[in-house]
Image: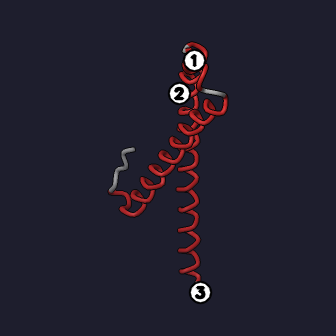
Amino acid sequence: MGSVNRASLDQQLALAKRCSHEGVMAGAKAAVVATVAAAVPTLASVRMLPWARTNLNPTAQALIISTAAGMAYFIMADKTVLASARKNSFGASYKADI
């Protein structure tokens, strides 16, 4: 392998790591927001509504909250990685709007 090819591969690897790190950070932020947004009404309804108090045990409550957080994480991480890939493939002429 020549030094030009090796440098190009190293640059592509660094770019891929940066893009995936951006996706992880955006996903984590979205998961935190979704956790709070799902936890407040879930926990409030369990305390106030008789049906919810009877039928939603702590496992069900945790499942509702964690599902919302997981979905938010993967959706936002995917959107961020795809936007980064689009931006990097089209160069400076592309304006990403997320």
Q: Is residue 79 above or below residue 48?
A: below
Q: Residue drawn 32% across and 57% down?
A: 93
Mark 3 → mark 2, Cα distance in angstroms: 52 Å
Camera-side residue: 84 or 33? 33
Which residue bears the numbered disc 1? Answer: 44
Q: Residue drawn 59% across and 71% down?
A: 10
Q: Residues within 10 Å of mark 1 (few under 14, many from 20)?
A: few
| Mark number displayed over residue 1 | 3
Q: Which three-letter amino acid code belongs to the residue tagged 3?
A: Met
Give the SS element for disc 2: helix
| 97 to the left or right of 74 | left
Q: Residue drawn 60% across and 21% down?
A: 54
Asked if the residues shown at circle 1 and circle 2 are in contact, with their CB atoms under 8 angstroms apart, the answer is: no
Return the x and y of residue 48 as percentages of the image width and height: 57, 13
Mark whose residue sits in front, 3 or 1: 1
User: Of callouts 3 and 1, which one flags the residue occurring earlier in the amino acid sequence?
Assistant: 3
Return the x and y of residue 35 as percentages of the image width and height: 58, 32
Give the SS element for disc 1: helix
Asked if the residues shown at circle 3 and circle 2 are in contact, with their CB atoms under 8 angstroms apart, the answer is: no
Which residue bears the numbered disc 2? Answer: 37
